Amino acid sequence: MASPGGGAGTHTDEEPPGNRPKKPMLAAAAIVGAVLISVPFLVAGQDDDRKPEKDQTQNAAGTVLDAQRLPAPETYTSESPKPSVKPSKKETTKPSAPAPKPVVVPPSPSPSASKPAEMKPKKKAATGPPPGTAAAALAGLAKSDPQGRHICYRAFVSGQGWQSAVCDGTMTGTSGQGRKITALNIAVWNVEGSSANALLHDGGSSSAKWAPSWTAVIGDGKNNYIGSSKPGAPFLTGFAMNVGKGNVCHTAKMQNGGWGQQFCKNGRPEYMFVGTTDNNNWFEAVKLTV
């Protein structure tokens, strides 16, 4: 049956339309496509054998689309390099240790050269009691007889000054000269110290007067003083003293008189008295023992 308005020709229902490719042609096209697809892989495999891994990475980076590429860097002008302030490590050299300086030894001073006054060593302070005092005289006795009991003393006599110290019953003062005693210096040993007070002439009274107070208890081997050695000091009409243990004894000579008997007193609080309370009389000499 002829199709209306169509050209001449016939076809069966089993055949595809005229514009479809035939099966042999499709098979050939598939083979050609497979060959074309395998060619890039073959080329890439050959390039991997010839180029290092770094070039592969650069080739891969070259496949990025132009739209995603970073903009080209700006153009900079060239400039001559400036010398660095710090020297390079190669130029830096470790300084060598300085040569040791020669030691200059100063010349020793001449033996005849004298030292400056400020360089002279100071003399050591003298130890022990002052020379000539009762304690100085006692020191020799105490050294030779440390267990013994001793007393040393000296008088300051008007017109003469301090006499030499004497010990253990020897006289101090004067006899038959009428000289007055204005001070006494006493030191004891092995009696637990001494204490004393002076009875002084008082020109405005008929009776002598005691000094304001007794001395403190002065220890064994030390100087104890009563009265005064200053010019014009009043003379002693008498004195009192005591010791810490044992007893103390005296024998005295009064002005215009002879030696009296010996008197003794026990240790503190008792005390021994020498002389007179008469303001117009005095003792000239005394002997002491403990």
Image (cartoon, rainbow, N blue to C red):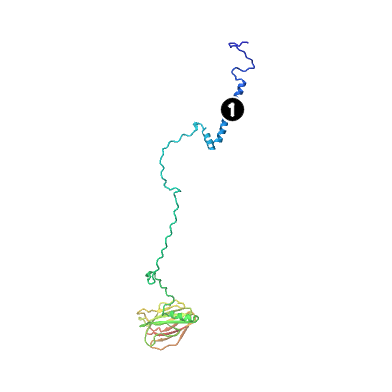
Q: Secondary structure at mark 1?
A: helix
Q: Check the image and report above or below for 173 versus 98.
A: below
Relative height, residue 198 to residue 93 (above, below): below
Compared with 119, 164 (above or below) is below
Nearer to us in this view, 18 or 270: 18
Residue 39 in sight from this viewpoint: yes
Q: Which residue is painted at 60% across and 25% down in the image? A: 31
Are there few (<14), some (14-19), or many (20+) residues within 10 Å of tag 1?
few
What is the count of numbered marks? 1
Q: Position of residue 74 (x, y in %)?
A: 44, 36
Please name the amino acid that badge 1 sits on. Answer: Val
**Can see residue 269?**
no
Label 1 sits on residue: 35
For the view shown, which residue lies furthest in the bottom direction?
258
The quarter holding residue 202 reads bottom left
Q: Horizontal and vertical percent for residue 144?
A: 48, 81
Q: Quadrant of the N terminus?
A: top right
Q: Residue 219 in the image: x percent, y percent? A: 46, 77
Residue at image x 57%, y 31%? Answer: 42
* Along the viewing direction, whichever of 258 and 88 lies nearer the viewer: 88
* Of 25 and 4, the residue lying toward us: 25
Q: Quadrant of residue 236?
A: bottom left
Of all residues, the one furthest to the right in this rendering is 14
Residue 161 rendering spot, x and y as whole percentages:
37, 81
